[in-house]
Amino acid sequence: MSPENGSNLLESDAANVSFKETELTLGMPGESRGLTLVEKASGKRGFLETVDLNLGRSSNVDYDRNKDSGESETDVSSVAKPPAAKSQVVGWPPVRAYRKNAMKSCKYVKVAVDGAPYLRKVDLEMYNSYQQLLNALEDLFSCFSFTIRNYLTERKITDQEVNNSGVEYVPTYEDRDGDWMMLGDVPWKMFVESCKRLRLMKSSEATGLAPRTASKCSSSS
Amino acid sequence: MNYFPDEVLEHIFDFVTSQRDRNSVSQVCKPWYKIESSCRQKVFVGNCYAISPERVIERFPGLKSIFLKGKPHFADFNLVPHDWGGFVYPWIEAFARNNVGLEELKLKRMIISDECLELISRSFPNFKSLVLVSCEGFTTDGLAAIASNCRFLRELDLQENDVEDHRGHWLSCIPDTCTSLVSLNFACLKGDVNLAALERLVARSPNLRSLRLNHAVPLDILQKILMRAPHLVDLGVGSYVHDPDSETYNKLVTAIRRCKSVKSLSGFLDVAPHCLSAFHLICPRLTSLNLSYAPGIHGTELVKLIRHCRKLQRLWILDCIGDEGLEVVASTCKDLQEIRVFPSDPFVGNAAVTEVGLVALSRGCPKLQSILYFCQQMTNAALITVAKNCPNFTRFRLCILDPTKPDAVTNQPLDEGFGAIVHSCKGLRRLSMSGQLTDQVFLYIGMYAEQLEMLSIAFAGDTDKGMQYLLNGCKKLRKLEIRDCPFGNAALLMDVGKYETMRSLWMSSCEITLGGCKSLAKKMPRLNVEIINDNDQMEVSADDRQKVEKMYLYRTLAGQRKDAPEFVWTL
């Protein structure tokens, strides 16, 4: 499932970002990413170590997915069930939930949509790709019917713009230097680190920002 | 026996401050019991379900200050369901009803609601101090009530609580007339605060000595606050991200220079590490440094900072300091008494420190008394060396990220290493172990750990004998928590009377059965034996032979508690 024109966008130097993250799939966000999600969330390459308990109880080994991680629990466990797979034990290491959450570094940013009377906030740490984030944004502002231009894949995320005013938005963000950038140019993790807030700009206003050709996009990576 | 009038005894007892000593005093004779009880102002209740509030009020009519603990310790690690219990409301309601002149309230691992906070703020006109540690159930609205109504508020200290942030202006609710603030800690709040109100508050609080900010307080505000509060003794920096060339930074350096009293530093929740040199001015005076929430400080910046901290007594740090970093600590901080090394990545099993760092610390810091150490591996040799170098440990907690890992060099269990620790550290009161451990280590503990009060065990032991050695040996044991160990009914029921000399026992994922627990409950009516059945593992009519996943028992004078949720059965 590789959209050809978008596939070269993310030949980035960030070692831990794969093309797969921004690949548009038909599934629900997060699905079929299985253990990959676990690695990404932890930011480490190493696997979790098996705890061989030999107590004859399967209930000892559980999946300590932090509740706020937003990852699909069933996906992880269904992938990791075979005994050879590495797993994490509930309550180990004995670190307070508060500390675990703090180290997880919640990354809440404000989201403004041109024309909407109020802003929302999203936790960027809850997502693993631009695709997931854009989907979540559409959900968040679902009372406004609009679409978000996704320059990663050069096609619209949803096709529901048939009868509405066809208002199209361009996702932009303000980075640490105070500059307004378009989503998708930098690897996801880099984006999470540098994003201070999001703004969905009306396409009509986003002149000069939004190339319609793939070549311009790829040149900015 | 008494030739002194009561007032004289009262006056003498005033000098006895520790609760343990006062408990001893009260047991000397009936008159002393009466006098001591009538004038005791500060009470500590280690288990809120061990006694009813009414009894406490009745015995201590002079009660002004209370410290209550709720959930069992393992609740910290998600082993106890959230709504298990530990509600403080009945206590506050009883205090209010009985006109207790409450001034100070400290809670740990309890559930406190906004209504409760409001009740506190309205019921106790002299209320001065609220300290909440690892609590939940409240929002910033509750804080607003405390802020608005407690006119003599001296201390509001929120440590690691789970607070729902409604982004209200709770801080601005503190009236302009309130100038009594001494300590304010809101580092755990996730939301914004009214920065102008914060500045004004600091400006009108001449007694402010402790201030811990959350991440929403930016650098320029920090600088202004420090200018207004040069007498601070304890500072928690929130956000520390800025441009080192900016004017704000220069102003900050000036402000820090004025703070000649800061002895304790923490925070740096967001940090640009290359600008830490401003704090090098403060470091030489520091006795306490907590960088355990500052993953952004590591490498050379961290080491540079540590090298300035020659007077440090307490250090909380992340394992990204590495063994080499710990060597720097060992060579710099000769007065170190307490160190905690936390894992910087608690979700994955990789820690950046090993036994090497621990040995270095023991060599360089002979005054070490208290350690919490999350590490990648350990060896018996290292533990034996540490035991020799530091016989003064009172608290020793070692957590190897792989909980059943043997000696990294010899592949033997770590029995000998921990055995050496308990043998050498005659004053050891708290011990927490990990790694591959057999019954042998429990034999050692039972034999040598005479002062041991609290023991935490996980994935250890071979047979019931392990637990039996413990129960037989450790005369001063108060809290025992066990998970994933092969201890069964024979161990549990060996000495049922022992549990009345202890505060509590936790056993999860062990070999005890429903029948064993029932038997225990029957023999010991003054124990609450709770089965926590949160995963619907057992049915009411379950077979007695079924294993119990989670059991928590504690001595109590209050009988079965009435607020237990459905999944908690008191046998």
Image (cartoon, grey):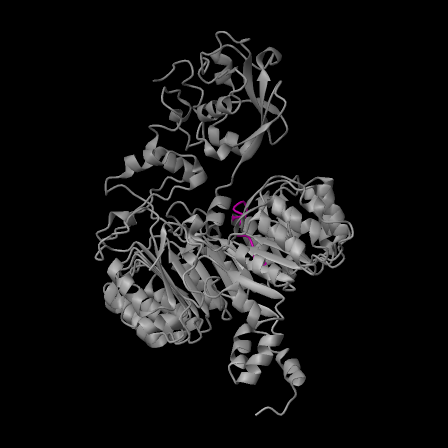
Q: Quadrant of the N terminus of chain A?
A: top left
Q: Main secondary structure of the magenta part?
A: loop
Q: Dividing the picture into quarters, in which one does residue A79 lie?
A: top left
On screen, residue B467 versus residue A158, left or right, reads left
Residues in magenta?
B289-298
Identify the residue at horizontal 56%, vertical 70% (top origin). Answer: B58
The relative height of residue B497 versus residue B112 in the rendered view (above or below) is below
Q: Nearer the viewer, residue A44 or A58?
A: A58
Q: Nearer the viewer, residue A206 or B197?
A: B197
Q: Furthest residue to the top?
A: A163
Q: Nearer the viewer, residue B476 or A16?
A: B476
Q: Position of residue B443 (x, y in %)?
A: 29, 72
Q: Position of residue B479 (x, y in %)?
A: 40, 66
On screen, residue B283 versus residue B52, left or right, reads right
On screen, residue A159 versus residue A114, left or right, reads left
Identify the residue at horizontal 74%, vertical 41% (top origin). Answer: B247
